Image: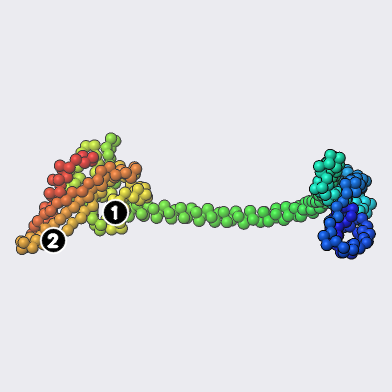
């Protein structure tokens, strides 16, 4: 393989110039093939020293662009769309064609490697190697600073252009805004005048609509009052007569369909006292038939309020009746009545259950009425013995 006699770099076949150092390659006389083992060419120490000094001289004659000039080049590159960079390049700030610093650096690096491999043990050559390596590293560092300055110039230029563009945009926007505001003031004035005319017409129309709405609301309110009054009249009956210091208690015994007024009166007779006033007619027959009794028995406080029971009673004693009539198979013509009364004492003010219990009894007779009457009589005896909060 052919090598450059100056820097030792590999050469292509028939090359006239070294791509590493740019030196001209002269034709070498042919060597007679007398020896079967030719020795490789070794650059002498003096030649290598001369080549290193030459490379160092060339490198010092082409220093990297200063940070200031690189910053200026970057500064003019963006606003000139790259033309400024090309002009500076043509003036040779970043190197000359045919003998670029890149080639010089490559040649110097190769020669330093050759020196280190062959003559590094020689003190003078070692000193030359250290000097060359130091200057090469310093050159590379300064070249890096030059590139940083160039990039910084581009960034500063871009920021300045952006700021100028923003200021121009702001000025243009202000001008456009002023024109828009002037036009908007004209439109606003026209709109205000039109709005005043429309407002006057709308107020006139709204006055009529408002009057109609008031009349409709009054009609609806009167209808609602009448409907509620009809509701109360339908479901709320007799109101107890009270005196100061007495407690109003409404009592009703009923199943899911009808009231049992005789049983209710019997229960009241057992509960009557000077401090309590009882009534059996607070809830009408319609209240039982329409399920209101069952809702109150279940503790529906909203229904109590809707029926305004707080105006008529302090406590509800609701007794749900469950009766099962059966014929006795062991005795002819004997009827058995299974009767269960479930008692719920409910506070009308809060809807809370004050007392709750159930009593069950069985009665027998020749008819269902007599059997039920006996079962009820036995239940009343149980009720007398039962301690309730209403007694």
Quadrant occupied by the C terminus: top left
- Pick out the residue farthest to the left: 331
Q: Residue at x 90, y 53 (%)?
A: 6
Considering the numbered disc 2 on the image, is that residue within a helix, a strand or a loop?
strand
Which residue carries the number 2 mark? Answer: 326
Q: Are there few (<14), some (14-19), or many (20+) residues within 10 Å of tag 1?
A: some
Disc nearest the viewer among 1 and 2: 2
Quadrant occupied by the N terminus: bottom right
Q: Is residue 390 left or right of residue 104?
A: left
Q: Quadrant of residue 97?
A: bottom right
Q: Nearer the viewer, residue 304 or 89?
A: 89
Residue 291 pos. (x, y %):
30, 56
Q: Nearer the viewer, residue 204 or 11?
A: 11
- Pick out the residue farthest to the top: 245
Which residue carries the number 1 mark? Answer: 294
N-terminal of the two: label 1 or label 2?
1
Q: Are there few (<14), some (14-19), or many (20+) residues within 10 Å of tag 2?
A: some
Residue 271 pos. (x, y %):
19, 42
Residue 229 pos. (x, y %):
37, 52
Q: Residue at x 29, y 54 (%)?
A: 294
**How was the colour assigned to the protein in this rendering?**
rainbow
Q: Nearer the viewer, residue 262 or 54?
A: 54
Q: Which mark is residue 154?
A: none
Q: Residue at x 70, y 54 (%)?
A: 195
Q: How many angstroms separate mark 1 from mark 2 (CA)?
A: 26 Å
């Amino acid at each position: 393989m052919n090598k450059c006699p100056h820097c030792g770099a590999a050469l292509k076949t028939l090359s006239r110039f070294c791509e590493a150092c740019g030196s001209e390659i002269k034709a070498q006389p042919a060597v007679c093939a007398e020896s079967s083992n030719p020795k490789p060419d070794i650059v002498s120490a003096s030649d290598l020293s001369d080549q290193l000094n030459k490379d160092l001289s060339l490198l010092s004659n082409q220093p990297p662009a200063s940070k200031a000039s690189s910053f200026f080049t970057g500064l003019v590159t963006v606003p000139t769309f790259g033309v400024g960079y090309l002009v500076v390049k043509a003036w040779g700030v970043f190197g000359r064609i045919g003998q670029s610093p890149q080639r010089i650096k490559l040649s110097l690096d190769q020669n330093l490697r050759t020196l280190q491999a062959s003559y590094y043990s020689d003190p003078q050559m070692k000193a030359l190697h250290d000097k060359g390596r130091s200057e090469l590293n310093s050159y590379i560092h300064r070249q890096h600073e030059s590139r940083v300055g160039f990039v910084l110039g581009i960034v500063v230029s871009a920021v300045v252009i952006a700021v100028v563009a923003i200021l121009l945009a702001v000025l243009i926007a202000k001008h456009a805004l002023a024109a828009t505001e002037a036009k908007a003031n004209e439109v606003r004035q026209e709109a205000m005048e039109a709005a005043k005319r429309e407002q006057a017409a709308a107020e006139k129309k709204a006055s009529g609509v408002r009057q109609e709405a008031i009349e409709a609301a009054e009609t609806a309110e009167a209808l609602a009052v009448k409907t509620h009054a009809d509701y109360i009249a339908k479901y709320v009956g007799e109101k107890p007569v009270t005196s100061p210091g007495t407690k109003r208690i409404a009592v009703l015994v009923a199943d899911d369909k009808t009231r049992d007024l005789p049983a209710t009166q019997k229960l009241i007779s057992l509960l009557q006292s000077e401090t309590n006033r009882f009534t059996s007619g607070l809830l009408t027959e319609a209240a039982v038939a329409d399920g209101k009794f069952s809702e109150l028995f279940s503790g529906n406080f909203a229904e109590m309020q809707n029926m305004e029971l707080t105006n008529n009673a302090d406590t509800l004693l609701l007794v749900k009746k469950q009766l099962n009539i059966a014929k006795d198979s062991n005795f002819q013509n004997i009827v058995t009545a299974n009767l269960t009364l479930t008692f719920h004492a409910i506070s009308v003010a809060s809807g809370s259950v004050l007392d709750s219990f159930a009593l069950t009894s069985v009665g027998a007779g020749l008819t269902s009425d007599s059997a039920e009457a006996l079962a009820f009589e036995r239940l009343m005896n149980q009720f007398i013995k039962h301690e309730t909060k209403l007694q």
